[in-house]
Each structure stands twice: as C-alpha cells, then as structure tokens.
Image (tube, rainbow, N blue to C red):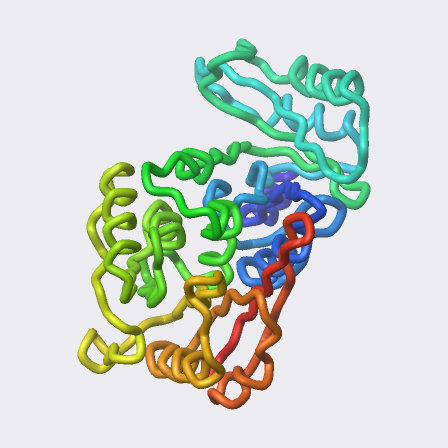
Amino acid sequence: MSNKTIEALKGQYVYTIAFHEDEEELCRMEMRALFGVEPIHGCVRSDKNLDPSRSPFIRGKLAVDLEASDVDGIAGQAGDAVHLQGQTFKVVFMETDDRMTYEQQRSIERQVGWRIRGKAEMRRPDRLLGIACVKGSWLFGAYEKSEAVWLKHNKKPQPYSTALSTRVARAVVNIAAGDSPPDKLKLIDPCCGIGTVVIEALSMGIDIIGYDHNPLALKGARVNLAHFEMPDVVARADMRTLDPAGDSGGYDAAIIDLPYNLCSVLSAGERLDMLLSARRLAKRVLIVTTETIDDTIMEAGLHIVDRCTVRKGSFSRQIIACKS
C-alpha cells in the first residue's frame, strides 16, 4: 500500500459494539448522539476519535492504518508498514457481526502476527494491534481496549434500589453530551439523588453539578462521591428555584430523572413545573421517565428529537432527548 493511501486512512476509526437485547434501543440512541449513525454489523466506522471507555457499549477502538480485501493482503501490508523499534506486540481480532469461530479468530491473529517483524507478547505487550472485518473489508491498525470504568461505580456505599444502573447512567450522560469534547461541556442534574449520573459524568471528565431537595439523598450522594475520590459538586435546592442566569449563563444540557417511586409521586402540575425549569436551565434536556408524558413535554415548550425505551424484565424507562 502506498504512503498516500495509508495517509488517506488516517483519522478513521472502527468501534466494536456489544449490548444486551434489553439495552439495544439505548445503545443505538447513544451511538446516534456520539457518532451520528447507528452501529452496523456490530461496529461503527467514523472519523470521530473517542475514548472507547466513554461508552458502556464500546468494546474497543481501531485506529485504521491499513485496508485490504482479504487477510493475506492485510498481513502483507502489516509486515511492511509496522515498525516496532524494539517494542513487543500483540495482534487482537476485533469481533463484529461477521461471526467467526474462536479457532478462526486465533488463526487470523497468527497469520498477521507472523508477518510482523518483532517479538510477540501475549500478556503485557508494549503495543496492541487490531484487525477487523467490516463489510467485507479487512482493516488493521493500533487497537485500544475499553475499560469498564462504570462497573467500579456499582459498589456504592450508599446505593438506592430504584436508581439508574451505572451502564444506563453513563449512556444517558453521553446522549445528553452528544459529540462535544467532555472538557468543553457543562451539565446539570437537578434531581441527582444519590449521584449516579453525576459520578458517571465526572469519571468522563465532564463538568457537572447536581441538586436535590431531599437532604438524605444529598447525604448519600456526598458519601458516594467521596468514596470514589470525586469532588463534592452537589447542593440542596428545589430545581424550580434554580436560576441559570446566576450561574455562568446556563448549561449545555440538563439531565432530569423524574421521581417515580411511591414516596415521590408527582402531580401533573409539579411535573410540568419541573420540565419548565429544565427548559430554563439548558437548551438540551434529557428526560428519564417511567410514564408517557409527551403532552407535558410539549406543554413545557420542549421538542422531542430522539427517544428510546430501556427494559429490565417487566420494568421499563423512557429516555427522551429534547430541545427547547
């Protein structure tokens, strides 16, 4: 492959995707928010360079350097193009929907690895190299594995039975944030509860502040934040009293998980007031609800731009992305 062709592939990435069937709609909505497309054949190919650990549905990222119509072609190109300069390496097969057996995957890794001049190291290689088959094309380049950061956040000292799971919370943050760089965002969670959404946002480097009118929930949120050595970014307030003009001119997005358990029954008027407040706080509003509230959303002056349903057994939540 010529240098010109290699350069033409620079800036292209393949992200392999995996999800449970109950979270398929959420995964697809998150991919639309992050990449502007849905996964096809178990992956997303994009020119957007994201940390693969940002999404609970991304398994790994390939920075594409080489492309060929078959494995032999990729192996030959890799032998010419990869210069390790004394570093060890490992070739990783990235599994997409082009299903191959375990033996076939390992055979392909060996076929490519044998052509690379250098020392292979299976346990702790200096460099990870990936190979993937996407729509009949074979792609090769640097590989980065996703780290399941959100799993560590399951072990909260102050859990709550009806709180979002860390996977759903992380996806919700990504949908609210969209494809903006994490360090350029300012989010608000005005019903933060024990801080599940706040913790996921902070772990991605996103500036977020949380509020809740329940002092017991805030106490739990502070304990959880301290447990993960995160800053105390929560305060007590009724979201209907918050003034965006008094806090740097508002937020890029608001995430509002509407109360729904027996101890937090909302009247229609209270729900409308909360949505009106969310609209004042941010131009983008992401709503999590167990009820169908489309009429109230419209009454609040919000326009639905995307949505999905997340199920867990017989229980379901709607995730609704809105703009004012």
Q: In which quadrant of the rendered view does residue 309 lie?
A: bottom right
Q: Quadrant of the N terminus?
A: top right
Residue under the point 51% across and 46% down: 167
Residue 130 appearing in the image: yes
In the picture, measured across the screen, residue 79 lies left or right of residue 231, that is right
User: In front: 199, or 264?
Assistant: 264
Q: Note whether 50 is above or below 267 in the view shown.
A: above
Q: Note whether 104 is above or below 211 in the view shown.
A: above
Residue under the point 60% across and 80% down: 294
Q: In which quadrant of the rendered view does residue 117 lie?
A: top right
User: In front: 123, or 161?
Assistant: 161
Q: Residue furthest front?
A: 262
User: In front: 198, or 182?
Assistant: 198
Residue 11 coordinates in the image, percent (x, y): 53, 49
Q: Number of callouts in the render? A: 0
Residue 62 appearing in the image: no
In the picture, measured across the screen, residue 152 lies left or right of residue 295, that is left
Q: Note whether 33 is above or below 151 in the view shown.
A: below
Residue 324 coordinates in the image, percent (x, y): 46, 84
Residue under the point 65% across and 17% down: 113
Residue 75 coordinates in the image, percent (x, y): 71, 24
Residue 285 coordinates in the image, percent (x, y): 45, 73
User: In front: 245, or 72?
Assistant: 245
